Amino acid sequence: MSNEQKHTLGYIKSIDGVRGFFVFPILIMHLHLQYIKMPAFIAQFTLHLFFILSAFLISSILYKQKEKGISFSKFAKDFYIKRALRILPLYWAYILFFIGVAVVLHLIVPAIESQFLGVIYDIKHFGWMLLTFTFNYRELFAWSQDISHLRCHVFPHLWSISIEEQFYFVIPTLIFFLSKRSIKYLSIAVVFIYPFIRIFGFIYLRDIVQMKTTYGDTWNVLYNFFYRSSLFQFDAFFYGLLIPLVSIKRKYILYIGYFLPLLLMIVAQSYSAILISKEMNMDFLSAIHLPATVFANNQFMFMNTLYNIFGFFLIYIMINVPKSFLNRLYYIKIFRPIGNVIYGMYVFHPVFALTTLGLYYGFLIKLIPNILADIIAILFCTLTTYYFAKLSYNKFELRFLKMKPK
């Protein structure tokens, strides 16, 4: 079986494992606990990994569809119907639910809605961005209008799905009209050019735009625009497109591609954390948890490229080297069920993170040792998010998934 055939046939169990495994960095990052902290670069890498993995899976499906010899109109129509049925019902149900909650709270206790939930404010100023999947430019728009973007606690994470949908707006056309060879060379060109786009974009913009992050510190455009802009992130998807189109037969190249970016990320981020810990008079673990470590010392110019290279080789090894240590890790049963309902966990996790934080700071750290409180908080947040996402999948999302074109 050829390399391309292996990528376009069958269901790969370890993919659910890798998705389930990398839920934890996001949850821990968003919990902001006392002792158990997640380095910011691992949480940010996780997002890139999901972009790469998503592009790989979608392109593999589209290659098979193209082989059926159907017209472009049917090819695109089937793709967008399937994508809409997978994404939109839960996406809009989540948004509409919190709009309803916000309206009720606004009528009963407006102070709670405006000071904590902030949904009405976000819908008023940024609702059109949620509707058009341009929510990843929320901070940039807020800065241009001199308005706050810090009011809402339940919508901010939806920026990443906007980047995905922007990519999926073009992917059916690319795959239908270009040969695999052309897509391969286009993807290579994109992943080669994009590091320079980020470097020159960084140099040009770093001293121009100043905005507020969700942490309230004055940082420049690096976090608010660079990290959340598809203009500077699209190459992650092209790494995903490359996975089924290249063949790397020498294992030492695979492991160099895997371990070298990982080592560079650890060294660079550790150096930043040491400097920040001295400057802000905090311990190393607290410093490396801050997103500032990713951008300190101009590291943003190359960190995203390292994320993408590392993610590419991680997925490539996982798929092409079945007996690798990565497959043994991601075959662990505890991760695969989580990966099965990953979209629901992505959508719902801020709600359960906020609930967990209320219990954590309200009760747990006052009653039990902090390290034990951290462990219980992580377990509680993971389990509640997982079981609610599972319930949503079985009772709500499946109704729409069954409507997909066969």
Image (cartoon, rainbow, N blue to C red):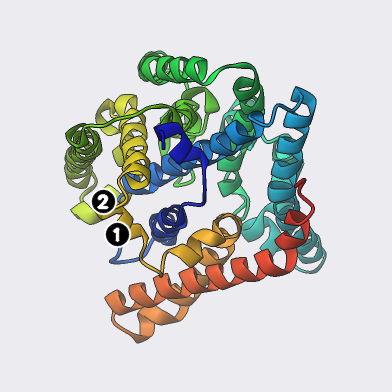
- Seen from the viewer's position, the closer of residues 349 and 274 is 349
The spot of residue 357 in percent (x, y) is 47, 69
Label 1 – label 2 distance at C-alpha: 7 Å
Residue sitting at x 41%, y 38%: 1
- Seen from the viewer's position, the closer of residues 77 and 236 is 77
- Which label sits on residue 324? 2
What kind of element bears circle 1? helix
Residue sitting at x 44%, y 40%: 6
The spot of residue 212 in percent (x, y) is 49, 37
Query: Is label 1 in contact with label 2 (beta carbons under 8 Å)?
Result: yes
Residue sitting at x 30%, y 65%: 36
The spot of residue 157 in percent (x, y) is 56, 48
**Amino acid on which the number 2 mark rests in the picture:** Ser
- Which label sits on residue 285? none
- Which label sits on residue 328? 1
- Seen from the viewer's position, the closer of residues 248 and 206 is 248
Vertical placement of residue 96 versus 394, above or below? above
Splitting the image into 4 quarters, where does residue 161 fall?
Answer: top right
- How many numbered marks have been drawn onto this rendered protein structure? 2
Q: In the figure, is residue 106 to the left or right of 309?
A: right
The spot of residue 141 in percent (x, y) is 62, 29
Residue 38 visible in the snapshot = no
**Amino acid on which the number 1 mark rests in the picture:** Arg
